[in-house]
Amino acid sequence: MKTARIISLAIISALIIGTPVRSKEDNSFNLRVVLDPTFYCAADHLHIPGKVENNSDKAVGKVKVEGRAYDENGNIISSTTSWVMSDNILPGGSAQFNLEFLEIIGPIHDKVKSYDVKVIEVQ
């Protein structure tokens, strides 16, 4: 297993709830985060789904992503992490993820003004 490396990626995406997304890129592994529209589950938690695309010519192992939700002043309301749904992403392939924010429920939804998602670990 390769030594875990921390990298950061995020990509701007249109959101159903109209929340702007912060963007940061680091192509150390030539990975790209693509976000799908956010949603609220039956338990009323905010979810940010998406996928990590491997745009390199080498397979990567497990990939962990982190999402952070911010208020109007840029303060972090909540953060969460998740492994993508694959242990191996082949060149040109992708793997899905679903970040669930357990603390963002009910009236806290309206406090979320932006968020970002980045890759934080690659094995």
Image (spheres, helix red, strand yellow):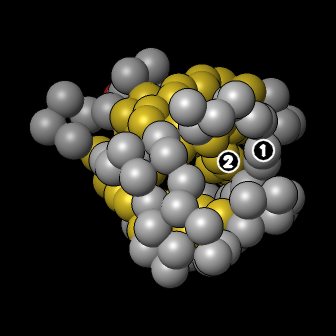
Disc 1 crowd, CA 10 A, few/some/many (<14, 14-19, 20+): some
The picture places residue 57, in percent across and down from the top left corner, at 63, 76
Frontmost residue, 93 versus 114: 93
> What amino acid type should be assigned to the residue bearing mark 1?
Ile
In the depicted structure, whether residue 111 falls above or below residue 49 = above
Is there CB contact under 8 Å for labels 2 and 1? yes
Look at label 2 and name its amino acid. Answer: Lys
Q: CA distance from mark 2 to mark 1?
A: 8 Å
Residue in the picture at 14% in, 37% down: 42
Residue at 43%, 37% in the rendered image? 83
Please give the label number shown on residue 70. Answer: none
- In the picture, which quadrant includes the C terminus? top right
In this view, the residue in front, 98 or 112, is 98
Numbered marks: total: 2
Q: Quadrant of residue 12?
A: bottom right
Q: Name the residue beneath numbered marker 1.
A: 7
Residue 118 badge: 2
